[in-house]
Amino acid sequence: ARRALAGAPEPAGDEDRGGRPAADGPRRLLVVEGRPNGLLSLVAENAMADLARYAGAQRQVEIVTAVGAQEAATALATSACHCVVLELDLPDGTAPRLLEEMERDPALHAVPVLAHHNRGVGAQDEHTVRRDAGRPLEFLSSLDELRERVALHMSADRPGAVLPLVRGAERDTSWSPQADPVLAGRTALVVDDDDRNLYALTSILELHGLRVLQAENGRAALEALAAHPGIDVILMDVMMPEMDGYTATAAIRAMPEHEGLPIIAVTAKAMIGDREKSLASGASDYITKPVEPAEVMARIKHHLSR
């Protein structure tokens, strides 16, 4: 899939291989994720909108999306790219293999890759993926940071011209000027089937120092809770496919180890009875859409301070 953003009309025959579009051609951003029109595509669109709004549209930018590593390999073989956004958690572990294929192609060595995983990447996993990489490669778990890095790379004159993001021992990420001591370092699970809601809530929570995990329905929320028992608070949308928020909340409350886990239901303001039904299923509290950042953080802080 291809989406062109503001700028001059796209000329034909505008590129050579290896991320080197001709001077008047569009800059292409390749987004590789596990499903069509996913969260990373939304982040890329927001980044390009910000770039056009604040830096001016000097030339056209085209977002090319690929579902899975195979589509990504085809896109890289047929079109030059200025930057690649890669979902590390692709099905069947294909993301590292895609990086290996890119390493074997000398024409792609300068193309930067922004690798995202919403659960974060451990030092050993990062070392394994980065070990043989000769390209610019950044690991990002924050969606806001990813958006900023996409905009920065796409505004650069040539692929790979941006200085790499400092990580590991070189950067202390344990403190943020906006982070409240009650919230910093705590883990929140955001459950919603709408990528825009996931993005908005994740951005709010990360700004205040929380680590954020995501799930797209109630069943995925139960799986995330089993895999990450250290979750401190859950924001649970009530209307979702497969398993709704009411059912998921009741299932969590049936687990003795999570009897006191704060679960804040996210309900539609216009739906009469959502509040009562949410609390009856075991929710600790509720907020209504569209969410207000100050209210979200006040409710979370209240429950984590108890």
Image (spheres, helix red, strand yellow):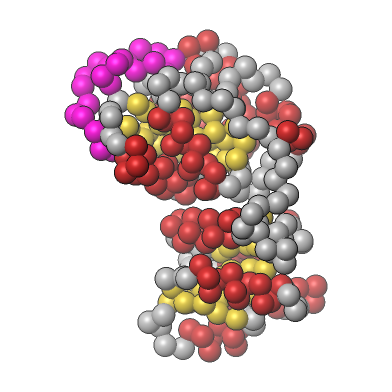
Q: Which residues are magenta?
A: 2-25
Viewer-closest of 216 and 301:
301
Q: Quadrant of residue 299?
A: bottom right
Which residue is rendered at x = 21% and y = 29% of the image?
8
Instruction: Look at the magenta stretch and give its main secondary structure.
Output: loop
Q: Which residue corresponds to the image point at 40% horizontal and 36% vertical from the top-left?
A: 65
Depicted 158 relative to depicted 166: above or below? above
Q: Quadrant of the N terminus?
A: top left
Q: Residue furthest front?
A: 177
Find out whether residue 129 is within the magenta segment: no
The vertical placement of 273 against 86, above or below, is below
Q: Is residue 55 visible?
A: yes
Question: On the picture, is 305 further left or further right than 17?
Answer: right
Q: Residue at x 35, y 42 (%)?
A: 54
Nearest to the observer: residue 58 or residue 126: 58
Name above or below for residue 133 compared with residue 176.
Answer: above
Q: Is residue 306 left or right of residue 55?
A: right
Q: Report if residue 7 lies within the magenta region.
A: yes
Count of marks placed on residues: 0
